[in-house]
Every structure is written in C-alpha cells, then in structure tokens.
Image: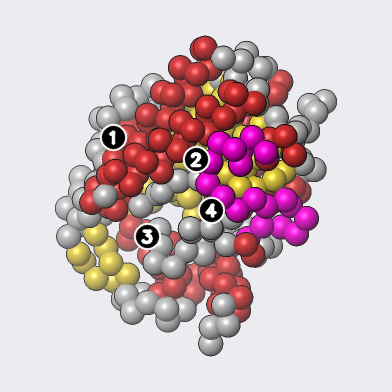
C-alpha cells in the first residue's frame, strides 16, 4: 500500500489543477494549493483544502508552505497556456512557464521534496511526421508555448540526474469537459478551447464559433485533435503520483490522450447533437502556431499505470462541458 503523502498543487484553482485537487481529495490524499489567481478561481477549490495565494517564483513562500504542509510531492500546473498569445508575447511564456518552473524545481530540491509531476503538452511535438505520436517522436515545437514546456522537461530530467528527485511529465493532448458532478470546469473568460467556445455559443454567450483553417491535410481540412476528459486526466495524475512513490528511482514521460482524433467540424457536430441546436460556424484564417493534427499513441501510459479512462466519449465530454457552463452561469448570476 502506497503511503498518501502531502501534495502541493500549483495552479490548483485553475481548470486542470482544480480537477486534480478534486481527484486527490476524493482519493484521500492530503493536498494544499498555491495559486496567484491570475486565471484561477477560489470557488474551484474544495472546502477544507489549504490555499496559499502567491507566486511559485516566491522561494520564501514555497519554503514556508513545504514546512507547514510537510510537502513530499508537487503537481505543477501553474503557467500560461494560450498558443497564439505565446507567439505574440513569447517572453511572457518563457517567464511564466520556464523561469518560474526553474524556481519551483530549485525550491523543491532545497527543501528535499522528492517527487514532482509536471503538466506538459503534446505541443512539444510540433508538426509530427507520423500520427499517432509516441513519446519518442521528435520534439520540434512550432510555438513558444511548446518550447517553454519542453525546456522545463529538460530541466526536470537534468535535475533528477543530479538530485534525489523523480518526476513524471505528462504530455496532455486537448483537455475538455468538466467534473461530472459539476464541482469545477473550464471557467476562464475568453478561453480559446474549442469545446468551451462551442458550448458558450450554444447557450447564447457567443454569436458564433470560428473555424480557424480548412486547408489542413486532414480528412475534412480542419484541425484534428485528441480530446481527453479532464476527469480522466486528473485520475492519471493521481496514478502517476503513486507510481513515483512506488519506484523513487524511476522517472516517467508519458502521453495523456485517448489515441483517437476528432476534427473541428466533428466536434461542432457533437455539440449540435448534444444541444439539439445548429451552431453558427464561420470560416476564418489559420491561427499562428497551430498544428494540423495531434493524436496520441497512449500505449505507454496504459502499460505503465492502471489507468482506465471513464469518459472516453466525445458526446459525454461535450455534455459535461455544457452542464458546467450552465452551472457557471448560476455561480456568476448570469441570466
């Protein structure tokens, strides 16, 4: 039996981070959160979870948290995630995603925190030559967001060779959906995630959905992505944490997706089905930094962890996202 050690979740008030906190708390792990609330929400954090407002670049604050919480593991979500913004403001991304991660890793080494899980991304693969992509596929990011994450993966690998720390880097594909019990979901105003945008449009919060590019080398010309339910992704983090504790000399880097891609138009068709509406779709130019297709080869994570996705169905993902969008309207007092 693995001892459930105290865990600090960075960015635990954000979209994916809050679901990881829920999964950890549901499974009985002692968990605390640090978040600067630049994009996170206090209502996303379960009652009873200690919350520290601050920045992961603040070494003194991290040292205090580690001491107060007896932290033995870190799950690191804090960072910036909008691909087109990373192209227009690269230094923001290298600061938030790389420089601050370096500060967090350094604080962990100083305090002797031995286990680290990192929220990485499939964007590290860039424009893959083959699909699905394996963990050994070439890493050639085509935008600063992907490069900032890949640099942090390298820092972790180098640090693990030099210090008593093991890590797991999970390369996410397209995260979507919401907690099935509607305790959390994608809450960011102006979010760029397709399913989030589409359910906002279905509820009248947007006039239309933009389709960015129809000339990709894909079956219908629109971008293809591997959509993974956020609750299944959160479960993978809890299982990865157990794996790090069970084998403290081993580090892991794994894709986190379902191994099935859907195009933009297929996703919008799913939203039409679930809502019984017809969304207004408007064709627009490609966005800078977007790849045509990103689909995971998930054999490694399935072989390494006892991970059994519960929500690997596009209509289910859309349904949970829609339910959360309605709940979010109630939280914010929207009409």
Disc on the earlier residue, 1 or 2:
2
Which numbered tag is attached to residue 36? 4
How many other residues sit within 10 Å of disc 3, few (<14), some (14-19) or many (≥20)? few
Which numbered tag is attached to residue 57? 2
The quadrant where residue 3 appears: top right
Task: Reply yes or no: does residue 216 show up in magenta.
Answer: no
Structural distance between the alpha carbons of marks 1 and 3:
19 Å
How many other residues sit within 10 Å of disc 2, few (<14), some (14-19) or many (≥20)? some
Closest to the camera, between mark 3 and mark 4, is 4
Magenta region: which residues? 44-64
Disc on the earlier residue, 3 or 4:
4
How many other residues sit within 10 Å of disc 1, few (<14), some (14-19) or many (≥20)? many
Closest to the camera, between mark 3 and mark 2, is 2
Which SS class for mark 1? loop
Q: Which residue is mark 1?
A: 141
The residue lying at 72 percent from left, 43 percent from top is: 31
């Amino acid at each position: 039996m693995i001892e459930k050690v105290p865990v600090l979740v960075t960015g635990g008030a954000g979209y994916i981070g809050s679901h990881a906190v829920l999964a950890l708390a549901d499974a009985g792990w002692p968990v605390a959160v640090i978040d600067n609330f630049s994009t996170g929400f206090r209502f996303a954090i379960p009652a009873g979870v200690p919350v520290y407002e601050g920045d992961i670049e603040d070494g003194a604050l991290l040292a205090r948290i580690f001491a107060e919480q007896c932290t033995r593991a870190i799950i690191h979500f804090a960072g910036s995630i909008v691909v087109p913004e990373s192209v227009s403001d690269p230094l923001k991304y290298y600061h938030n995603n790389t420089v601050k991660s370096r500060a967090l890793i350094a604080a962990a080494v100083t305090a002797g925190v031995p286990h680290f899980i990192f929220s990485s991304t499939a964007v590290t693969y860039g424009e893959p030559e083959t699909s699905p992509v394996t963990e050994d596929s070439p890493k050639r990011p085509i935008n600063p967001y992907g490069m900032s994450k890949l640099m942090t993966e390298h820092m972790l690998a180098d640090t693990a060779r030099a210090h008593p720390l093991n890590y797991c880097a999970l390369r996410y594909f397209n995260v979507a959906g919401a907690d099935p019990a509607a305790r959390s979901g994608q809450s960011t105003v102006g979010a760029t995630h397709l399913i989030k945008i589409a359910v906002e449009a279905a509820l009248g919060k947007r006039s239309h959905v933009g389709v960015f590019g129809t000339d990709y080398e894909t079956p219908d010309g629109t971008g293809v992505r591997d959509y993974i339910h956020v609750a299944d992704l959160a479960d993978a983090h809890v299982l990865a944490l157990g794996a790090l504790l069970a084998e403290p000399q081993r580090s892991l880097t794994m894709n986190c997706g379902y191994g099935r891609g859907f195009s933009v138009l297929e996703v919008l068709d799913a939203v039409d089905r679930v809502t019984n509406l017809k969304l207004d779709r408007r064709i627009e130019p490609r966005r800078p930094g977007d790849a045509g297709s990103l689909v995971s080869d998930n054999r490694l994570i399935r072989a390494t962890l006892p991970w059994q996705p519960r929500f690997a169905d596009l209509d289910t993902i859309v349904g949970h996202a829609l339910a959360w969008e309605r709940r979010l309207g109630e939280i914010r007092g929207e009409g």
